[in-house]
Amino acid sequence: MEGRQPSQDARASPVQLLLKTEDPFDLNLTDSRPSVGDWGLDAAGVFFLPVTWDRSYTHLCSIFTAFKEATGDRKNPKARLEFPSSLSIEDRGDVQGTARNFGLGANSSGIGKERFLTIYTSSNQAKKAKDALNKAQKGKRLTPQQEKEAMDMWRCWQAVGGEGRKFSQKEVLEMVCTGQVDPELRDVYPRWLRAGKPDRNVPTARQGPRTSQELFDNIQWLKPESGQVGQVFYNKVHLSESGAPPGVKDSYWTPEARGSTRVLSHAEAMPTHGLTHALVCTSQVLDSYILNFFPPSVALSVVCPADSSSPPLAHRTMLQCPHHPADSTVMDSPCDCADKRQVDVIHPKNSRRLHANFCVLRYEAHVRLVVTSAPFSEQGWTRQGQLGWFCDLPLSFTPEVTQQAGYWAALRDQPLASDLEFILCQLGVPQQTVWSLLTDADFTAVSACVRLIPCVPGRVWPRTQDLLPYMYVPFKRTYLTEALYSFSPE
């Protein structure tokens, strides 16, 4: 394919292919975290991301290399590359052959000329490609000059950093032996030679007494260019038992708060005055503390793990009466009290492993987003110390339908708003509830450096099982926990 000269029409018409996956967060996209709005969702519930191929062999190799890195160079049945039916028979054959050389599987499906080509990860094909490479290496030895060039390439990649990707010396030797050098390495290697083969200059502990100052000088401080970054707080820990007799003042333990960090009780962090709608996402099973915290006039939605009597995936409506708590049921309440309310209860997929703790509170004039390190429980707010963060978003009312449509389109351009909308969707929160909570909330006052991680960062069970995107730091290792980060004024 590399030697064939495409026609002028072929060179002028790039191919639009699709990267498809059931879970974008399961892919290791190291370049950058793509905004949620870039991913589409088809009728089958599969996410897709358009990728443009310029029909060149080098570009195709870079696409396959990136695909293997995104899947961790292992079998991932959820991810695949789909080429359109516009590919000619010759192009399909070339793409299939190149894919097999990369250890990827290829499958052609369809009828007649309407045939689609799918590239997927395949452990069998990867083994065949490795065996073929080993066989080719046995019959071909590198000259001393080629070995020196391979070592220089490896030093070059170590020096430039390689966008977080790592090649071992053996891998670079294999590239030179087979003539299939990584396109990015092939591009940076001549420039590195022209620059005089500079070494990477990274301060380390081996550099002696000057290391501390050098490390300090090399720190890159994260600062908001504009907008607020929210408020970090500790909770007040109760020292006295609840239900103290009249006249006895409650006593609290309050940690020493530095800078702008505040110390708040549960009622101070989530006031109920003027509250109209509350969504609570907690890692604890629904109990009376959540139901009794919010007044009956507040519309309440709860995302929580299912108990042993609930199905693993369900969206149910519970009727709650403040005067007859024992009659709270998923069926019709037997009482006729006027102030009984409906509570939407959502149990997402794998809810028993849910570890997200955050609240979206809609007031008459603003929306408050609260992220906490402990669940929404009496124990978590009164007996345990925890760290929290909240951000207030003013409401800018746009009554026109056209303005509403424009609002939701603009919402996806703000990182925090895009994160929140996507996470609520992944949790199975109904779209009507999302609209009710977030419509007219103004996210533009929030700094673009603030991103939402409403959980303990890091994987919480083996990667071989299904991953919930709201339980794991997605896409990039340098993706910071801004949701729990405080900027203290000097």
Image (cartoon, rainbow, N blue to C red):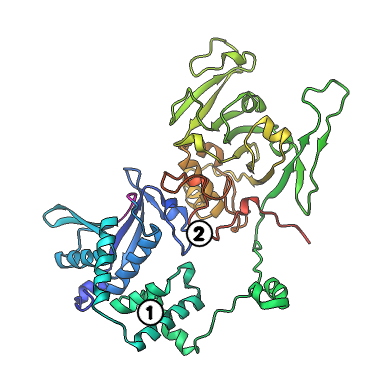
Circle 1 residues within 10 Å: few <14, some 14–19, many ≥20: few
Q: Quadrant of residue 179?
A: bottom left
Q: Residue at x 54, y 54 (%)?
A: 414
Camera-side residue of 266 and 431: 266
Specify which label sits upstream in the sequence, 1 or 2: 1
Q: From where the camera sits, is residue 421 visible?
A: no
Q: Amino acid at mark 2?
A: Lys
322 left or right of 37?
Answer: right
Q: Amino acid at mark 1?
A: Arg
Q: From the image, tell me which residue sits under label 1.
A: 186
Q: From the image, tell me which residue sits under label 2.
A: 476
| Residue 373 image position (x, y, % from top left) | 64, 43
Dominant secondary structure, magenta: strand
| Residue 254 image position (x, y, % from top left) | 80, 41
* Quarter of the C terminus within the rendering: bottom right
221 left or right of 65?
Answer: right
Compared to residue 325, the image places residue 365 above or below, namely: below
As helix, strand or loop, the secondary structure at mark 1 comes to helix
Q: Residue at x 62, y 51 (%)?
A: 483
429 left or right of 231?
Answer: left
Q: CA distance from mark 1 to mark 2?
A: 25 Å
Camera-side residue of 433 and 372: 372
Q: Quadrant of residue 248?
A: top right
Magenta segment boundaries in residue numbering: 77-81
Residue 482: mark in rendering: none
| Residue 394 image position (x, y, % from top left) | 64, 46
